[in-house]
Image: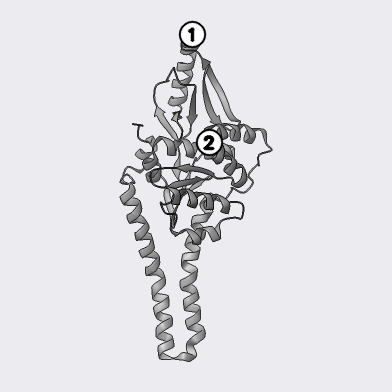
């Protein structure tokens, strides 16, 4: 049995994440999003019932209801967005870091990392995709994704080392990792997919396929 | 040959190499290990595919011990 992630002490007030809490938090997120959007849909319906000529205002209200979850999903997808000014694999420290990270991953995950910049790691809560400053957790079945902000607050590290930090912490204590990380979004996979960069989308597709195969 | 490495701005730096049967090298490695932990690093060893363990004592039989910085929610 691996020791608990020491970083959990920094968020000692949070209960340890587990299967039940991830499911609950996902539904809470959905309920909160619904609470934000349904009033706009209701208002649009009421406007149309009272005055059909108010159609433009009702349409704007519906659009508002559509935009809110899209903005949340965008925030979620951004957790695995490459950092601006990322030095790229041509810099020597980055090559060294990617070499170590590659050694930690299996062949398929290493190939996926080279293509997409994201490291795939199966866990007990689902299939994880790790970026430099965040992680996506594709839940079993592949229909829902949880997006987490989690990073190494250390300037100057190569991108590969940032991913390796997250990978090692995740492997040491997956539930602790999910506890330390801050949730940025939880919801439908298709919403997150639309907001990912074209380079990263294949990684999500692979993670969804892996989560369905489990 | 076992290695103690630290992930840093150079990619990673090898801090010590040792063989369990070489007490002098082990002593140097243990000292380097303790120094890095005192400076806030955490040590991790891979324990199999997809598995790792946080350690607070240098495992002399491990092939590779990796030192990492703490992570935090963003």
Q: Are marks 2 and 1 in contact (CB under 8 Å)?
A: no
Identify the secondary structure beneath mark 1. loop
Label 2 or label 1, whichever lies nearer to me, is: 2
Which labelled disc corresponds to residue B22? 1
Residue A105, horizontal then vertical, whole percent: 53, 36
Q: Nearer the viewer, residue A123 or A172?
A: A123
Q: Nearer the viewer, residue A55 or A140?
A: A140
Is B4 displayed left or right of A26 in the figure?
right
Q: Which residue is drawn at 63% across and 44% down?
A: A86
The chain letter for the residue carrying disc 2 is: A
Instruction: Report the side of A137 relative to A98 (left or right).
Output: left
> Which residue is located at x 42 percent, y 42 percent?
A123
Label 1: chain letter: B
Badge 2 crowding class, 10 Å Cα cut-off, few under 14, some 14 to 19, many 20 or more, is: some
Residue under pointer 2: A106
Q: Can you see residue B74?
A: no
Please give the name of the residue rendered at 63% of the width and 36% of the height, measured from the top-left corner: A94
Can residue B8 be seen here? yes
Q: Specify the color scheme.
A: one colour
* Residue A135 image position (x, y, % from top left): 48, 47
- Specify the farthest residue to the front: A213
Q: Find residue B66 and report its horizontal and vertical position in percent.
A: 49, 27
């Amino acid at each position: 049995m691996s020791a608990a992630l020491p970083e959990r002490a920094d968020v000692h007030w949070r209960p340890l994440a587990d299967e039940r809490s991830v499911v609950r938090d996902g539904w809470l997120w959905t309920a909160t999003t619904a609470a934000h959007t349904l009033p706009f849909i209701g208002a649009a319906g009421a406007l149309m019932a009272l005055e059909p000529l108010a159609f433009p205002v009702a349409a704007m209200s519906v659009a508002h209801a559509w935009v809110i979850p899209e903005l949340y999903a965008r925030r979620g997808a951004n957790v695995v967005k490459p950092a601006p000014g990322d030095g790229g694999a041509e810099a020597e420290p980055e090559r060294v870091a990617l070499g170590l990270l590659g050694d930690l991953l299996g062949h398929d995950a290493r190939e996926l990392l080279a293509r997409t910049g994201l490291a795939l790691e199966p866990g007990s809560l689902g299939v994880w995709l790790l970026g430099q400053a965040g992680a996506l957790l594709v839940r079993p079945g592949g229909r829902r994704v949880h997006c987490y902000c989690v990073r190494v607050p250390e300037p100057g590290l190569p991108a590969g080392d940032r991913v390796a930090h997250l990978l090692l912490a995740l492997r040491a204590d997956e539930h602790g990792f999910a506890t330390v990380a801050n949730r940025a979004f939880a919801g439908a996979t298709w919403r997150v997919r639309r907001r990912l960069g074209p380079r990263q989308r294949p990684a999500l597709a692979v993670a969804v396929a892996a989560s369905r195969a489990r | 040959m076992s290695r103690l490495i630290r992930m840093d701005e150079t990619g990673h730096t090898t801090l010590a190499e040792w063989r369990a049967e070489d007490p002098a090298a082990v002593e140097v490695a243990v000292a380097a290990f303790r120094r890095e932990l005192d400076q806030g690093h955490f040590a991790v060893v891979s324990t199999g595919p997809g598995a790792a363990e946080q350690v607070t004592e240098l495992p002399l039989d491990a092939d590779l011990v990796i030192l990492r910085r703490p992570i935090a929610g963003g």
